[in-house]
Image: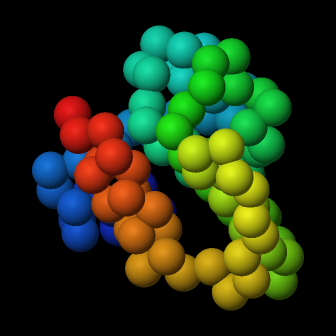
Amino acid sequence: MIAAGIALLRPSIEVATTRPEELALDVSRINPQVVISSQSEATSPAPVQAWVKIPIDPAQPAEVLFGGRRRTVSGFTLEALLAIIDEAEQSHPL
């Protein structure tokens, strides 16, 4: 659902989905700027510009690692996610 929303609202962005058990392999293969996952960035074999850990339990805060800074965000929205994607794209356009 999140991938579909991003693809619809940001058609210029390449969106790829994967299964949790294939995340590390796909991150190293695709080399994305932003990863959105229920897993921690510690599972990544390579650094990415932004990692957003969205919890399975929506009552829990999301964790955002961007540019080496970490923050937690309660009530994380699609708009907040799109702002992170936009910032990553402006920082390092494809």
**Residue drawn at the location 51% of the way across and 39% of the way down:** 49
Q: Percent x, y for residue 84?
A: 45, 62
User: Looking at the rendering, which quadrant does residue 10 occupy?
Assistant: bottom left
Residue 89, position as x, y percentages in the image? 30, 48
> In front here: 10 or 1?
10
Front one among 93 and 10: 93
> Does 42 appear above or below 55?
above
* Left or right of 53, for residue 50: left
Q: Does residue 16 show up?
A: yes
Q: Position of residue 77 (x, y in %)?
A: 54, 81
31 sits left or right of 66 in the view: left
Q: Where on the picture, by quarter, is residue 76?
A: bottom right
Whether residue 94 is situated above or below residue 9 in the rendered picture: above
Q: Is residue 1 visible?
A: no
Residue 66, x across and y down, in percent: 59, 51
Q: Residue at x 77, y 28 (%)?
A: 43
Which residue is pictured at 54% across the width and 23% down the height?
Answer: 27
Instruction: Using the image, determine if residue 48 lies above or below residue 24.
Output: below
